[in-house]
Amino acid sequence: MSKLEGEEILKKWRKIRPKERFPIVAVLDNIRSAYNVGSMFRTAECAYISELILCGITPYPPHPKIEKTALGTTELVPWTYFNNTFEAIQILKKKGFKIAILEITQNSLPIQIIKSKDFPLALIIGNEVTGVDDKIFSEADFILEIPLYGEKESLNVAVAFGIAIFFLIEKLNHI
């Protein structure tokens, strides 16, 4: 057994890549760290989601710290910047997207509840410290959480993003 490298890896993944990007948009609501944003660009490309929407104080390309972790994916992933997250969500709703917030609240539901009728889906990811802006909650169709089993109360935002996105794709692939 030998590891695949470079073009061999891409050849393998191109066999299963859908013709169009998955009907998932990620809305980054006031993410502070450019490194986290770069990581989310890389994950978004590997997951082949439709778009990243960067909002508020979220750093956006071109930015050297984003590029350090994005590794060129800012050129591959469709992305848009909005000064106001609420405005971005209103546009997504008009396009027929269901709105899901990834946040732990008293009423959040396990991400496993998502069904085929819930796509296309916009997943809102919030600030590393304060989470999703409170004003956005009234716009959500779902508040979703990733169940955690250890003693730490949360995951790094880019890690949570990756888990959530790949879980949603698995739901789509098995519907």
Image (cartoon, grey):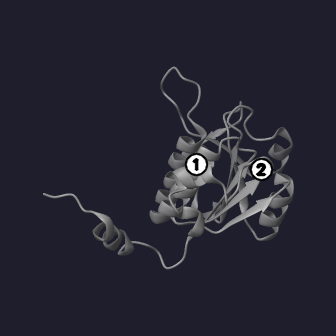
Residue type indicated by callout 1: Ile
162 versus 5 height, above or below: above
8 versus 85 height, above or below: below
Q: Position of residue 33 (x, y in %)?
A: 66, 41
Residue 22 visible in image = no
Element type where label 2 sits in the image: loop
Q: Position of residue 73 (x, y in %)?
A: 54, 63
Observer-nearest residue: 98 or 6?
6
Residue furthest front as drawn: 64
Q: Position of residue 110 (x, y in %)?
A: 58, 41
Give me the disc on residue 170: none
Residue at x-position 54% and y-position 55%: 70
Residue 20 visible in image = yes
Looking at marks 2 and 1 on the same chain, the residue that comes earlier in the sequence is marked by 1
Q: Which residue is mark 2?
A: 140
Residue type indicated by callout 2: Ala
Q: Position of residue 55 (x, y in %)?
A: 77, 53
**Position of residue 84 in the picture relative to residue 130 (left or right):** right
| 3D distance between C-alphas at marks 2 and 1 | 15 Å
Mark 2 or mark 1: which is in front? 2
Number of other residues with Cα within 10 Å of mark 2, as a class: few under 14, some 14 to 19, many 20 or more:
some
Residue at x-position 53% and y-position 42%: 159
6 versus 166 height, above or below: below
Q: Which residue is mark 1?
A: 113
